[in-house]
Image (cartoon, rainbow, N blue to C red):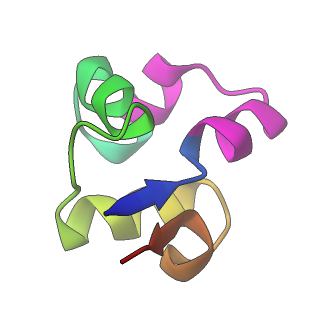
Amino acid sequence: MIKNRIRELRGARGMTQGELADACGVRRETIVFLEQGKYNPSLALAHAAAKVLNTTIDELFQFED
């Protein structure tokens, strides 16, 4: 299972889901599904989100057994 800190880090930067989606080149619904844990991102999307949120992929996503 993959947990993420997208909502937390996005909120700390005052970004909306739509703004993050635009910056990552995806639809807002994709960000909604990521935040809800209903979608596992591609490596490209994980990298883009981490870059926009000024963090690392390892800090943004946590892999749990």
Q: Is residue 53 above or below residue 27?
A: below
Q: Is residue 65 above or below residue 5?
A: below
Measured as percent of width and height from the top left, residue 51 is found at 53, 66
Residue 41, by quadrant, is: bottom left
In the image, what residue occupies the spot 36% across and 32% down? 31
Residue 34, by quadrant, is: top left
In the rendered structure, the answer to whether residue 61 lies left or right of residue 15 reads left
Q: Main secondary structure of the magenta part?
A: helix
Q: Is residue 17 magenta?
A: yes
Residue at the right extreme, as displayed: 12
| Quarter of the image where the C terminus is located | bottom left
Pick the residue in front: 61 or 48: 61
In the rendered structure, the answer to whether residue 57 lies left or right of residue 16 reads left
In the image, what residue occupies the spot 21% across and 43% down? 39
Measured as percent of width and height from the top left, residue 36 is found at 39, 31
In the image, what residue occupies the spot 31% across and 63% down? 1
Pick the residue in front: 22 or 12: 12
Pick the residue in front: 36 or 58: 36
Q: Find the magenta span and give its range.
A: 7-22
Measured as percent of width and height from the top left, residue 60 is found at 56, 65
In the image, what residue occupies the spot 23% across and 35% down? 26
Residue 10, by quadrant, is: top right
Pick the residue in front: 2 or 44: 2
